[in-house]
Image (spheres, grey):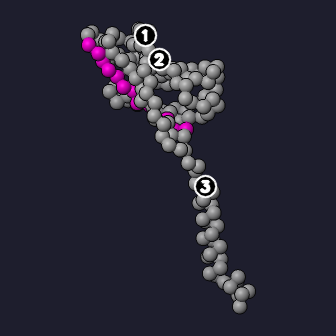
């Protein structure tokens, strides 16, 4: 009787369900942990005349990342640029916040940020969004010293 069970269709169906459960468990991604939030204030400087809206990324020798937002054209001399950064595992969402200020608009402002919370050697998926200007960029970033790249912001 026991040997007939091991040759029955029901036995093979149970084995197939167990195998599918093992594959599903093995394919489940590891938990990326809680979302970390950071707020960064930008250091403003006059940029090059006619600068396109873009991001210049430079991974420094100590593992920190310098991000420069070029071509900001909606600020005055009393304005500000800040970033709200949300990190979940290797997924990074950066929301640009612009405060125009009072007075005459200054063309071609650049805002510089120093990001110190990325892990050296890490590979991140970055999404950068500026709701005020409607500009967006998405790109991978490998945090290795010497990496330099420029990403154009598009609509």
- Residue 46: give x, y in percent of width and height: 41, 8
| Tally of marks | 3
What crowding class fits label 1: few (fewer than 14 Cα within 10 Å), some (14-19), or many (20 or more)? few
The Cα–Cα distance between marks 1 and 3, rounded to whole angstroms, is: 48 Å
**x, y percent for residue 42:** 43, 18
Q: Is residue 33 above or below residue 83?
A: below
Q: Which residue is drawn at 56% across and 34% down?
A: 124
The disc label shown at residue 27, or none:
3
Side of 33 relative to 135 (left or right): right
Q: Can residue 57 be seen in this view?
A: no
Disc 3/disc 2 C-alpha distance (Å): 40 Å
Which quarter of the picture shows residue 100? top left
Q: Distance between the residues labelled 1 and 2?
A: 8 Å
12 to the left or right of 110: right
Q: Is the Cβ of the residue at disc 1 closer than 8 Å to that at disc 2?
A: yes
Tag 2 residue: 112
Q: Residue at x 64, y 81 (%)?
A: 9
Quarter of the rendering containing residue 41: top left
Q: Which of marks 1 and 3 is nearer the N terminus?
A: 3
Q: Is mark 2 on a helix, strand or loop?
A: strand
Q: Give the range drawn in magenta.
A: 90-102
Which residue is painted at 63% across and 21% down in the image? 62
């Amino acid at each position: 009787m026991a040997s007939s069970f091991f040759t029955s269709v029901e036995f093979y169906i149970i084995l197939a369900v167990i195998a599918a459960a093992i594959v599903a468990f093995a394919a489940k991604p590891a938990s990326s942990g809680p979302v970390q939030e950071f707020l960064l204030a930008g250091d403003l400087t006059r940029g090059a005349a006619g600068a396109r809206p873009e991001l210049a990324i430079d991974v420094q020798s100590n593992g920190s990342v310098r991000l420069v937002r070029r071509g900001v054209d909606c600020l005055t001399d009393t304005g500000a640029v800040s970033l709200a950064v949300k990190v979940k595992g290797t997924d990074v969402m950066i929301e640009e916040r612009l405060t125009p200020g009072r007075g005459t608009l200054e063309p071609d402002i650049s805002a510089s940020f120093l990001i110190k919370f990325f892990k050296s050697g890490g590979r991140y998926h970055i999404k950068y969004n500026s709701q005020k200007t409607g500009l967006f960029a998405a790109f991978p970033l490998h945090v290795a010293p010497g990496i330099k790249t420029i990403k154009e912001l598009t609509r």
